[in-house]
Structure formats: C-alpha cells, structure tokens
Image (tube, coloured by chain):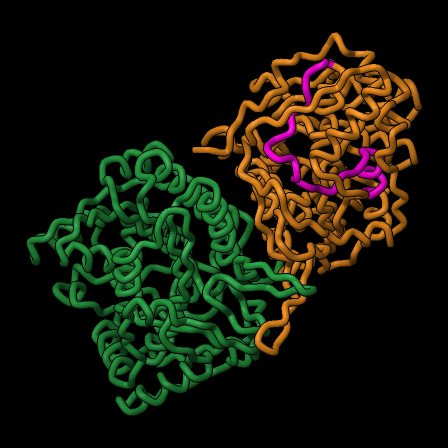
Chain colours: A green, B orange
Amino acid sequence: MRILILGGDGYLGWPTAMHFAMRGHEVTVFDNYLRRRITLQTDSEPLLPLPSLPERARRFELETGKHINVVIGDCCDHEYLLKAVQEASPEAIVHYAEQPSAPYSMANRNSARLTLENNLGATFNLIWAVLEAAPDCHIIKLGTMGEYGTPNIDIEEGWIDINHKGRSQKFLYPRQAGSLYHTTKVLDTDLLWFYVRIYGLQVTDLMQGPVYGQSTPEMDIHPDLLTAFNYDDIFGTVVNRFVTQAIAGVPLTVYGKGGQTRGYLNIMDTIQCIELAAASPPGRGQLRVLNQFTERFSVNQLAERVKLVGDRMGLSVQIQSVENPRKEAEEHYYNPVHSGLLDLGLKPHFLTDDVMAAMLERIHQHRDAIDIRKILPRVRWSS
Amino acid sequence: MRILILGGDGYLGWPTAMHFAMRGHEVTVFDNYLRRRITLQTDSEPLLPLPSLPERARRFELETGKHINVVIGDCCDHEYLLKAVQEASPEAIVHYAEQPSAPYSMANRNSARLTLENNLGATFNLIWAVLEAAPDCHIIKLGTMGEYGTPNIDIEEGWIDINHKGRSQKFLYPRQAGSLYHTTKVLDTDLLWFYVRIYGLQVTDLMQGPVYGQSTPEMDIHPDLLTAFNYDDIFGTVVNRFVTQAIAGVPLTVYGKGGQTRGYLNIMDTIQCIELAAASPPGRGQLRVLNQFTERFSVNQLAERVKLVGDRMGLSVQIQSVENPRKEAEEHYYNPVHSGLLDLGLKPHFLTDDVMAAMLERIHQHRDAIDIRKILPRVRWSS
C-alpha cells in the first residue's frame, strides 16, 4: 500500500511509519517540525535528543533495508501538501499533523491561535489536496476521545440515534471538549464530515485516548529509532509523566481529586489500530468513527498502579494531589463504547504490571536526563 | 448603551446601526468591505450603488442629527480589532462580520479557504478582544438556522436533552449544515461555547433564517441610507431574488422540487431581535441560543406568493424549476421551535400581500438597474 503519514516526526507518526515500512508498504512521512519548535520554545523537550527525520530514516534503512521517504513541509502550505500528495499518490493518508498539546493551546492567545490555524488549516488543505489529487484515498484522521468530554450518558462510537418527541434522527455524537486543542479536533471532524457528505471523501476518524509507552519492535532496533518521549506537563501524557516522576523521585502529581477517568492504550495498539483501519477502508462517502482505547483508568488508579509496581522495584513512590490547572470534572460518569476496533481484529496490549515495570526500567536507564522543572503544571485554564 | 457592530457595512449591519443610533445609543460600526470586494469579484453587485460607510454615516447625521462612529478595519487583524473594542468600550458587540454567502463558500478552494479563515478568524479575534478589553461585554453573534440542516426531528432552540440508555444529558443541538459557509457558523458556535464554558463569556447566538426586505424607518429617510440589496444567485436571499425576477420578467427559479422549507423574517424583525437580545443579556458564562424567524415557507410557497401578488399588479409572473445546484433535501420534515424571541417581546412583521406588494413596487422603481445575467445559479455543489 502507498501510505502518506502527515506529522510523521511525532510521538506516534514516526513509529507508525516504521511499522508500515517494515511490512513492505511504500511510506512517505511529511512534517514541518512544529512539535519540535514548540517543545523547544516551552522548555518541554523530550527525555532524549531526537535525530532529525532524515537521519532517523537513514538509520532505519541502514538497520532494516527498508526505505521511508521524507518530506519536510507544512500542511498549512497548500501547494506543498498538494505536491506531496501528487508525488506519493497514496491509497491512505494518516493525519497526525496537529498541534497536540491541550495545555499549550490554553497558554495564551498566540498559542491558541496557532493551534486553531494549524489544526484547521492542515485539515482543510488535506481535504482539498485529496479532492484534487487523490479523491479515492482513505483519510485516517486522528481524533481524540477528549472531543466527547465527559457526558452523563454512554459515549457511542461517533454517532447517536436521537429519539425526540416520537421521531428519530441519527447525528454525529455531540462533542464538548475540555481544551482548545480538543475543540479544534471537534471542528476538524465537523469539517471532514461536511466534505464527506458533499464530495464523497472516505474518512476514518479514530477517537483516541491518551497513549503510553515507547517500545515497538522497530523502535527497539536502535536508540536512534526511538520516538520523542515527553514527560513534561505540556506534551507528556499522564502515564509517561507518572512513570518518569516515579523514577525521578518526584511525587506523582494528581490533578485535583483524581477521579478523572479516560480510556488508555499502548503505543503498539495505536499502530495496530491504524493498520486495521487502513486494511479496511470505509468506502467513498463514509465517515467511520472508531473509539480507540483498550482499557479505562482514573488518574488515581494510574497513580496507584505506578506506585505499586515502582515500590516493588525499590522506588519509594509518593502520590500528591495538586490544584487542578484544568477546568474539568474530577468525578464523573464515563462509559464509552469501544467495540469497533475489536471487531476489526484489535488484539490489545494491556497495561500489566510487567508492561509498567518495563516502562519504569527503560526510563531508569535515562534517569540522568530527567529535568524535574518540567513536571509541575505551568499552564492554568484561567483567563 | 455603547454598541459595536462588526460587519456594519452589510445588508443587516447598516440598518441595525442606524436603528440603535436613532434611539440614542452610542454606535460604532466596524467593517473591512469584504462583502463589497466579493460582490465585485463575482459580478454580484447589489441593485443600487452603495455610498461608502463614512458617506452613509455623514448622510445619516445630516438627516437625523445622530452620529455613527465608523472604523474601517479587518476583524482578522487582532491588534486593530482590540483597539476598536478598547476605544468603543462596548456593553454589547453585534457580530455580523462573516462571509455570508453559501454559494461563494462552495465555488472553489480559495473561496472556501477565505470563508473558513475569515469567519473563524474574526470570531476567534472577537473572543480574545472581549477577554482582554471588555470581559463583561455581551456578544450577540449571528448564527443561522442553516446550521441545523433539515433533521427528521423537531429543531429545538440550540439545546437538546438527550435521554439515552436510561440516563440523560443536555447538549448543544447537533448541527449538520448544507454549505461550507453554514459549517463555518457551526464551528463558530463550537468555539464560542468552549470559551463561554472556560472563561465565562456571555453570548447570545441568534440562529437566523433567510431575511427579506429593504425597508426600515431609517433607510426610508433618504436613498443614500438604503442597505445593499442583492438579487443575484450568490448573495441574494430567495425572497429578494424572486421579487426582482418578477419585476424583470424572468421566471422565478425554483431549485429542484421546491419543497425546501425554511423559517423567514423581515429585515425589521432582524433589527428588533438584536434590540431585544441586547436589552436582556444572558449573564456571564451563558450561551443563549434563540431561533430567529417568524414564519415558515417552502420555496414553492414563496414562488406562488410572489406570483399571486405580482400577477395582481399586472406582472405576468412565471415559475420555473431549475436543476438544483445545491446538495439538499428537496422534501423534508421541518419543525423548528422559535418561542424564545417571542417570549422576549418580538412583534413579528409577517410577509403579507401588502408587504410583498411594497417590495415589488420598490424594485419596480429601479427595474432598469436589474442585470438578469446575475440571476441563474452560477455555483454548483459538485467537486
């Protein structure tokens, strides 16, 4: 399959690229290094230095003999993206090319503006590049479970039948997100769904929960092939943060009451889900929405799990509630359906004690690189 | 009241400004002439030449002694908009500053991009200018009934309680619009609702149906005070178009089956609704949504009404179905609630035969100015 990965330098984009290339697919990665620029500007650089995308692709080819085509460019530049789509002639495009940090999107007007313009602009240009150069191409868009927020009813997979005053209508499931970043993903979905209806695009929207981990068969081949691992308050997802805090001897920072519950998944399952989605496109004129996570935890449960496994390894892990920098429900109902990807064949990698221990051990090898100034919340959801 | 009207040069903005100024309010209009530029570029200029905004404000002051402050500027320029908000120090801002043509938004990639960037950019900058310079200000945002589309269930006023699997949650009513323009208004609402929740803005979203007419007490004072009257396929709303076609002897162009039903209102009622909303702000942290129209018609009913009144006046009005350039349901259920503005005190001006006759007579005075090349659909909803 010819596959184009937008945001191919990112935490998920790079391991996805290697996975597909390893299996003989023709892979092009496209990235403008936005995440690198923002992590540098916000003092949120990842645990280990990251070779450039061409350097990583060269290392990957050296180790495996598999080629990854690299294009450094900005999805917000329509002409450039169009050219990349024309040249890659993809059967599937994986769209990771978004500013992905909720705290960054809430930091100030300029960071909010960048998030809105980048995420909507990239999605808009992708839509038009596909219409113009690859109309049969399958767009695999990374959404987020955060688009749904925490409603008091079950979260369905993207769609809901509403029965109202004796009549019925199917709608996109109403979304109400907790950050501007998550809101831009709601807008993306609205935009894609509009162009699906009108022009018959085919789109899979993967509503992903927070991802953890940094190990895949391809990343484990050579240290230069590791993905960006962020443990800071701005780009670090909660499991990765807690594991790093446990190693650094910093109390695990639970925001508020810690009852915030989300659906989580291992980075290996993100890749598996992309592969499953790519293998069975939904067909022209379809917006397929799949909720992408494998198990649910509250923040308190995650902290307790990290403490349990960490303490067994001889770390003395502390847990500390800090004032919640976000505006979010700290205790809430949460029951999202997530059967679509299982039906497609997803075999989950759960967050077992062994997986947790392996994560802790890997971070332990790099404990000297941890900068504990990056851990406490630096962005508050107040104006 | 100090009131700032964004898009104050437009079909609705200008008469709204005069109405408030006439009643002693301190009015500032802000506009970048975007609509004028696009009507010129698309050969869709209004029936009569339009004096500039400062010229109209001078004429208005000459005739009435009432002052309107004019600022020519772009809402997409944050610094400029912020300065205008700081200087006007408004208690209410009426946000009309959007590219308002559905066909224009569907013409090509560049027109789509302009619509998305202008409408989202203006709304984003407005949100931040209010947060920074006038946080207690009441934002009166013009939405459109078109955001809802034509669902098979009753359309509520902005919100719906969804009962699902034995539990219940209130949501923004799901929106599914029929053009990119209408979709940008859906995105606007999502964005405003997010910042209402997080930062406690106070917003009224007026979900307006198609407006008709060109007569208000202030516009009737002097010909230079008339608002832009578009009768073309790109900017002309359907009643204004049909009335003009009847006068020009061009068959009324019903798109497809003509069963498309919408809620309509007289331009005088638009202004009345704005005034009612401004007089009773919803309070900080509230997004109030009101469905703004006074009566429902199908396109066929409108065409028949124009024909009935036109024929009585001696015009021989023909009706002709043309291939529908849009993708929309031509026969559908449509039952939107619209009690909120009536509860606030709206006294509707209905589309009586007398009102229709007065519109026909006024266009008749300017029949030589009609350019019939502008009437047939020039933009199709196909890629």
Q: Does residue A240 sit above or below B21 in this rendering?
A: below
> Is residue B21 covered in magenta?
no
Q: Is residue A141 visible?
A: yes
Q: Is residue A374 visible?
A: no
Q: Which of the 4 image quadrants contains residue A277?
A: bottom left
Q: What's the residue at 28%, 86% (across, down)?
A: A353
Instruction: Give the image location of residue A238, x and y in percent.
Output: 40, 72
Instruction: Give the image location of residue B366, x and y in percent.
Output: 79, 12
Instruction: Give the image location of residue A355, x and y in percent.
Output: 26, 80
Locate residue A222 relative to residue B174 in the image: left or right: left
Q: Which residues are magenta?
A: B248-274
Q: Nearer the viewer, residue A76 or B276?
A: B276
Locate residue A69 relative to residue B379 in the image: left or right: left
Q: What's the residue at 59%, 26% (across, down)?
A: B322
Q: Which of the 4 image quadrants contains residue A253?
A: bottom left
- Where does the C terminus of chain A fall, quadrant-wise? bottom right
Locate residue A227 relative to residue B74 in the image: left or right: left
Instruction: Give the image location of residue A241, x and y in percent.
Output: 37, 72
Q: Residue furthest top?
A: B368
How many numbered circles are shown? 0
Q: What's the residue at 79%, 30% (across, down)?
A: B305
Q: Which of the 4 image quadrants contains residue A80?
A: top left
Q: Does residue A294 sit above or below A63 in this rendering?
A: below
> Is residue B272 covered in magenta?
yes
Q: Does residue A69 sit above or below B373 in this rendering?
A: below
Q: Nearer the viewer, residue A353 or B79?
A: A353
Q: Does residue A206 sit above or below A127 in this rendering?
A: below
Locate residue A175 relative to residue A262 in the image: left or right: right
